[in-house]
Amino acid sequence: MNKFYSLFIVGSLLVTFGCNSHSSHNQSDSQNENAHKEQHADCSHAHWSYEGEEGPENWKDICPGYSACGGNSQAPINIITSDATSNDSLFKLTTEYNTSNVSVVNNGHTVQFNVSGENYLMIGEKKYKLLQFHYHALSEHKINDAHSPIEVHFVHKNNDTDFAVLGFMFKEGKEYDLFSKYLTQFPTEKGDFVSEDVIDLKELIPSNLSYYNYSGSLTTPPCSEVVNWYVLQTPQEASAEQITEFSKILHNNYRPTKPLNERKVFSYTE
Ligand SMILES: [Zn+2]
């Protein structure tokens, strides 16, 4: 694993997702990798996907800057709830969320809301700024071996080596307000949708923030192992039609679960 190079690009990737579908890693360059590592650490021309040659099993080999994808502390994982232990050092999560303009981008890997304004997740004394949230279908985390139809990730950053991602599942039920308003506007291919509207971020997350916690990684290249994961125990609801429509757009954009290895999963109940 090459932590330095993956960290080098993690910041820009989270914001721009520079994946160019018209170019791919040139295999003949691999013999010069050591001499040109810095160039290769810029993976903006590397292309990855969720299936085939450029799929999750091969991410670690697509670009040297993606070597962390082969690491031992990767996400997502299968959370076995009976193995999750409580721990006195865990904090209650507090969100200081306000409103954000609506800016939705389909970057070819996910549908993502880029968040504006000052919105924070407080974990003890630490303050993490909300950057964006995006969706996966099926869910990336499994809970007791089971996927949910959709999972959302609220990505927060304290610094370049300290991210906190709040994830939660969607189950079938009543309509989810954000989807009722904007699902028909979500770009079905690469592109974006921007409106003058503002959304109240507090209304998007469950009111109960009981969670499972473990140390892991980004679930997309460069897979940097810089993420404190907080997978909420309470799902949100979306209607069967909303789940079906959104899943068509997201197109199986989930990374299969990775081994827990030496890590522990903790549980915090509000
Ligand atoms: Zn994600």
Image (cartoon, grey):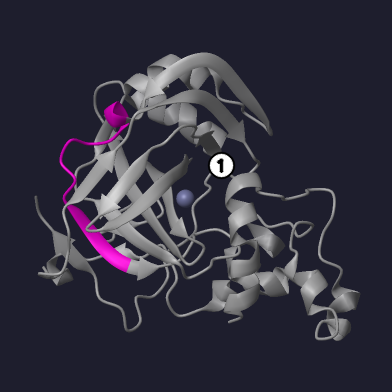
Asked whether the viewer can see residue 121, the reply is yes
Query: x%, y% of residue 110?
Result: 56, 42
Residue 85 picture quarter: bottom left
Residue drawn at x 45%, y 67% as measured from the top left: 226
Magenta stretch in the rendered image: 202-214
Residue reaching furthest to the front: 125
The residue type indicated by label 1 comes to: Thr
* Left or right of residue 111, residue 76 in this image: left
Quadrant showing the N terminus: bottom right
Q: Please, is residue 134 above or below residue 268 in the view?
A: above
Query: x%, y% of residue 150?
Result: 38, 41
Report which residue position mark 1 lands on.
Answer: 110
Residue drawn at x 40%, y 62% as measured from the top left: 76
* Left or right of residue 83, residue 230 in this image: right
Q: Please, is residue 134 above or below residue 73 in the view?
A: above
Asked whether the viewer can see residue 137, the reply is no
Residue drawn at x 22%, y 45% as measured from the top left: 94
Q: Nearer the viewer, residue 236 or 100?
A: 100
Residue 52 picture quarter: bottom right
Residue 18 magenta-highlighted: no
Label 1 CB-ligand 1 distance < 8 A = yes
Q: Please, is residue 17 above or below residue 220 in the view?
A: above
Dot 1: what SS? loop
Query: x%, y% of residue 89?
Result: 15, 69
